[in-house]
Image (cartoon, coloured by chain):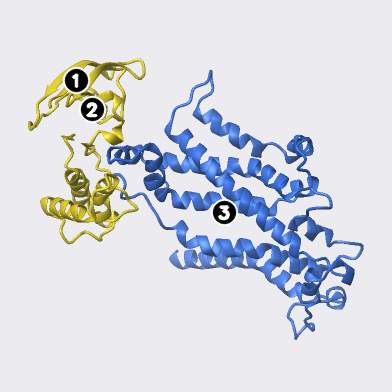
């Protein structure tokens, strides 16, 4: 029984690893191919099956005048919009979540849980429903096709995620911890940032990661709300596709796109296991 | 210098948690509040500490209206039934926390903390994380933090 269990365990781990890693390796391999290597036959391993070339990667940094697509500017646009919107969403979302977790709000039949649900309801709606109001709103305030306009929209999209995650996290931090901080001489703000916040770091990291991921991968709003002045990376990557699909540069751009998320995941991974509340309340 | 409560009532929902409670605690004395479960013992202590504001009644200490003083300025020490410590701080930092809030000098803080650690028998445990301590030791850290404060009212 235990041998079968071990076999099944390793079988599924191996299967899942291959399932997750294979497309990534395929993209790495394809990014070093050229037209011939992609279209003539199925090729896998550089130098054995095909002669690797950096053409797919060069296209990404060449200017359009030289036949490239220049993803550098969209890349930094995406980093700016995602980081700024995520940071603001986390700050505002954390404060809102703390209030929803610690104070009781009553307005007619509306209670704390209803307000929390109201926040997340934006994410339940299909994006197309929000696109028209966003378009009219940005157009009215003159922020259509601008980085600032995208930051505003992304804050609206990302803050519910931060609120949802942090409310749940703060609910798990014992209220007595805040009360002890107040008794020990902290005012409510000090109790929040000196005691509650340091014990909520894993929650902040999870919320931050989700905000960054959802902000970084968004294509729909970046596509609808920008035209010529500003472009974000997902839109630029899709724009690579023309009459002949350049799989090599598409693969290279996909790898470049996913790189920041992998870096962020590696940096924050070790913090996720830290900071438990086991010593807070006995 | 007495801690005087008069006709304190607290009714956050349908039921009274405190109903017309009065007391006169004299300085230097030790008082025990006894009562059955849900009779309002903790509510009374939280009201004295300032964590709850009564609907009616008054609390005065040193001839000041205690209810108008926010909890963080009351100089009250309180140890919960379930002992609470700051999990992100080690034993020493847990005990210094209220003293740093009061902006005492580093020398004074060290003296008070050493004294409190000695009283509860936790000398040598200063750098331990709270999670590394047994339940009893964690309780003593919470007690040491309250003792180190040298608060005028200990609950």
Disc 3 crowd, CA 10 A, few/some/many (<14, 14-19, 20+): some
Instruction: Please say if the residues under marks 2 and 1 sit with CB atoms less than 8 Å apart.
Output: yes
Q: In the displayed image of the protein, which residue is found farthest to the bottom?
A: A48
Left or right: residue A250 versus residue A207 is right
Q: In the displayed image of the protein, which residue is found farthest to the left?
A: B29
In this figure, which residue is indicated by the disc labeled 1? B5
In this figure, which residue is indicated by the disc labeled 3? A209
Q: Secondary structure at mark 1?
A: strand
Relative image position of residue A38 (x, y in whole percent): 83, 74
Between marks 2 and 1, how big is the CA–CA gap?
9 Å
Relative image position of residue A216 (x, y in whole percent): 67, 54
- Give the quadrant of residue B39: top left
Relative image position of residue A142 (x, y in whole percent): 77, 40
- Label 2: chain? B
What is the drawing colour of chain A? blue
Relative image position of residue B139 (x, y in whole percent): 20, 46
Between marks 2 and 3, how big is the CA–CA gap?
43 Å
Q: Secondary structure at mark 3?
A: helix
Q: Nearer the viewer, residue A192 or B125?
A: A192
Q: Nearer the viewer, mark 2 or mark 3?
A: 2
Q: Quadrant of the N terminus of chain A?
A: bottom left
- Give the quadrant of residue B150: top left
């Amino acid at each position: 029984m235990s041998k079968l269990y071990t076999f099944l365990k390793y079988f599924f781990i191996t299967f899942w690893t291959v399932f997750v890693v294979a497309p990534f390796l395929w993209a790495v391999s394809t990014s070093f191919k050229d037209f011939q290597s992609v279209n003539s036959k199925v090729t896998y391993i550089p130098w054995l099956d095909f002669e690797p070339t950096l053409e797919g990667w060069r296209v990404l940094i060449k200017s359009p005048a030289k036949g490239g697509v220049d993803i550098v500017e969209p890349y930094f646009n995406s980093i700016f919009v995602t980081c700024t919107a995520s940071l603001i969403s986390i700050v505002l979302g954390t404060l809102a979540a703390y209030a929803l977790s610690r104070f009781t709000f009553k307005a007619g039949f509306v209670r704390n849980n209803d307000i929390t649900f109201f926040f997340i309801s934006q994410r339940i709606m299909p994006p197309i429903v929000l696109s028209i109001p966003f378009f009219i709103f940005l157009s009215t305030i003159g922020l259509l096709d601008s980085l600032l306009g995208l930051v505003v929209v992304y804050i609206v999209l990302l803050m519910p995620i931060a609120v949802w995650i942090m409310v749940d996290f703060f609910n798990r931090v014992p209220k007595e911890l805040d009360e002890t901080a107040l008794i020990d001489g902290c005012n409510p703000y000090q109790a929040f940032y000196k005691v509650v916040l340091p014990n909520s770091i894993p929650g902040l990291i999870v919320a931050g990661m989700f905000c960054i991921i959802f902000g970084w991968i968004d294509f729909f709003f970046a596509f609808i709300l920008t035209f010529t002045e500003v472009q974000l990376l997902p839109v630029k990557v899709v724009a690579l596709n023309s009459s002949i699909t350049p799989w090599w540069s598409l693969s290279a751009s996909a790898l470049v796109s996913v790189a920041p998320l992998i870096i962020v995941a590696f940096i924050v991974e070790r913090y996720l296991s830290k900071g438990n509340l086991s010593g807070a309340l006995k | 210098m007495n801690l005087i409560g008069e006709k304190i009532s607290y009714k956050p929902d349908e039921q009274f948690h405190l109903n017309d409670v009065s007391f006169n605690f004299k300085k230097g004395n030790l008082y025990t509040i006894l009562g059955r479960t849900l009779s309002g013992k903790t509510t009374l202590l939280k009201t004295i500490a300032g964590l709850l504001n009564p609907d009616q009644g008054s609390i005065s200490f040193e001839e000041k209206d205690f209810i108008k003083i926010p909890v963080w300025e009351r100089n009250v020490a309180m140890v919960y039934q379930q002992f609470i410590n700051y999990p992100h701080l080690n034993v020493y930092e847990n005990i210094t926390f209220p003293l740093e809030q009061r902006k005492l000098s580093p020398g004074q803080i060290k003296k008070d903390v050493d004294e409190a650690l000695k009283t509860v028998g936790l000398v040598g445990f200063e750098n331990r994380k709270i999670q590394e301590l047994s339940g009893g030791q964690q309780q003593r850290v919470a007690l040491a933090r309250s003792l180190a404060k040298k608060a005028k009212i200990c609950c």
